[in-house]
Amino acid sequence: MTQLFRSLIFVPGNNPRFLEKAKKIQADIVCFDLEDSVPNDEKTSARKLIKNALKSRSEYSSSIFVRTNSPLSGKISSDLKEIVQKGIDGIVIPKVNNVAELKKIQKTLSGLEKSKKLKPIQIIPSIESAEGVVNSYPIASFGKRVTAIVFGIFDLLNDLGVEYTKDSPGGKYSRYKIPVDAAAAGISSIDGIWQDLNDLKGLQKDCKFGKSLGYTGKSIIHPDQISMVHKSF
């Protein structure tokens, strides 16, 4: 396995206070978010905030990633032009459906890295659709840039037309398949988030189950979840 990631925490890219507080977060990956947490009319300003935060890279103890907008959003090119710079370790790409999307992104990345004299940055694709699940092994084995894949349960369930419940989540086949494909490709697999911040016992149970499936880590949405996730993985 190329690299083990136990925890990936999303930090809203449009919130300067959260970006500053992230310097003290002890997750394996701090991921500045440009997607779900940022309204469309704040994307441009969020890119600039993240670009500025990356200038203080030495003040962050975690690996620093940025979650871009999805390949089909029409926004990812603008994201990459702004945030690919010194200080970034990698990008999380949401809603990846197939290898063709990764090829286009890699071409853009290579051009930016060459022009800015940067080393190749990592890619973590997020699997959040039926098509993505079907193609998760080719996505996971795309190349050296891909060091992990993430399972995104909520958008997947929406794609399947299935309702989420905490005690009996849908999409079980997909959740089971992702870590198998990641292990076959020799990379980490990061399980989806646990939404209920007040239910740490539920988080512990969910982490234990995820680990039993082969996941090497978990996505999180609040620093209070880090300790439990690190104890579990």
Image (tube, rainbow, N blue to C red):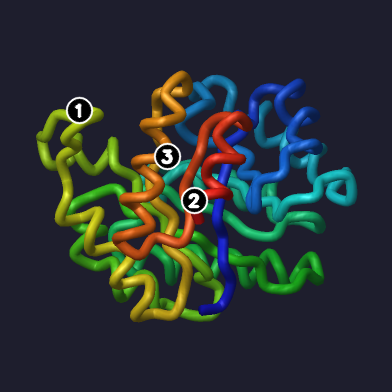
Q: Secondary structure at mark 1?
A: loop
User: Residue drawn 20% across and 55% down?
Assistant: 174
The reply to whether the C-beta atoms of the residues labelled 2 and 1 are less than 8 Å apart is no
- The alpha-carbon separation of the residues under discs 2 and 1 comes to 22 Å
Q: Amino acid at mark 1?
A: Thr
Q: Which residue is mark 2?
A: 232
Most foreground residue, 118 or 232: 232
User: Residue drawn 61% across and 40% down?
Assistant: 227
Q: Reply above or below: 104 against 224.
A: below
Q: Nearer the viewer, mark 1 or mark 3?
A: 3
Q: Which image quarter: residue 120?
A: bottom right
Q: Amino acid at mark 2?
A: Ser
Report x, y in % for residue 134: 18, 64
Q: Counting residues from the N terminus, which is met first, the one under dot 1 or under dot 3? A: 1
Q: Which residue is mark 1?
A: 165
User: Residue drawn 37% across and 71% down?
Assistant: 182
Report x, y in % for residue 13: 64, 31
Q: Is residue 53 left or right of residue 193?
A: right
Q: Few, some or many C-alpha atoms within 10 Å of disc 1 (few <14, some 14-19, many ≥20)?
A: few
Instruction: Say which mark, if any, is on residue 204.
Output: 3
User: Residue drawn 52% across and 45% down?
Assistant: 229
Q: Counting residues from the N terminus, which is met first, the one under dot 2 or under dot 1? A: 1
